[in-house]
Amino acid sequence: MPEIKALFWDNGGVILTNGWDRHSRKAAVEKFHLDWNDFEDRHELMLDAFETGRATLDQYLHRTVFYRDQPFTSADFKAFMFDQSQACPEPLAFLGQIARSRRFLMASLNNESREINEYRIEKFKLRDYFEAFFSSCYLGVRKPDPEIYSLALKITQQKPSQCILIDDRGLNLECAREVGMQTILFKDLPQLRNDLARFDILIKEK
């Protein structure tokens, strides 16, 4: 088993709720009385540009919601979007324990739009946990494209075999393994502890 030097963490579905997933979009459609099929079709067409930093939040909302007059404001809709982000307290606390040990390079590796990503970094004080943020909105490429993993490895100068990606989506992990990274599929905290133990990463429970 190689010595692990770096841990790369997905955010949504691991330490935080997802920022703007299908569940959140359905809730928005219900709250703001939108047409689901129309909104979702427009969302899918805008998603890549939105999450790779080529479209701002205002541009995304103009194309998906405010291409016609609405009885609510853009500020109302943005507030709802940001409110979808919540902490997963136990995994987040566990992340903090590992970060404080200073044994590993700690970085996030996530798909997120710039405004939601930066809201989450500020709201949940993620700079206290991560030394780097390899987010799709900054790198211009999204998981599971192998290029996002290659960029993170090149920038950090880490060997793939000495890095673990922790993610809740199998396809993201599959593509990370293809570039040589170790992977853990996140399901819950006890399972994560057990899987990290296989790499001799043991963190005492508090």
Image (spheres, rainbow, N blue to C red):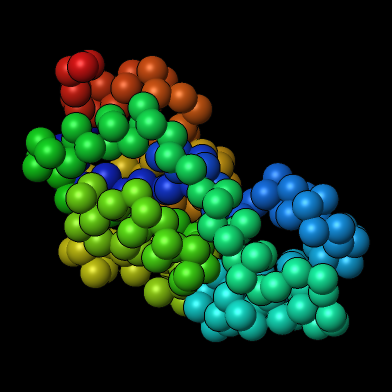
In the picture as drawn, the residue positioned furthest to the left comes out as 102
Residue 133 at x, y percent in the picture:
31, 62
| Left or right, 177 with reference to 104 | right
Q: At 85% from the left edge and 82% from the top edge, which residue is drawn?
A: 68
User: What residue sits 25% from the left and 61% below the top?
Assistant: 132
Location of the C terminus by quadrant is top left
Q: Is residue 24 above or below residue 3?
A: below
As rendered, which of 12 and 89 lies closer to the eye? 89
Q: Position of residue 27 (x, y in %)?
A: 74, 48
For the N terminus, which image quadrant?
Answer: top left
User: x and y percent of residue 64 in the render?
Assistant: 76, 73
How many numbered discs?
A: 0
Residue 6 drawn at (x, y percent): 21, 47
- Is residue 7 found left or right of 62 in the rendered image? left
Residue 195: quarter of image: top left
133 in relation to 87, above or below: below
Residue visible at 43% across and 48% down?
A: 11
The structure residue drawn at horizontal position 50% and vertical position 27%, both measured from the top left corner, is: 187
Above or below residue 83? Residue 149 is below
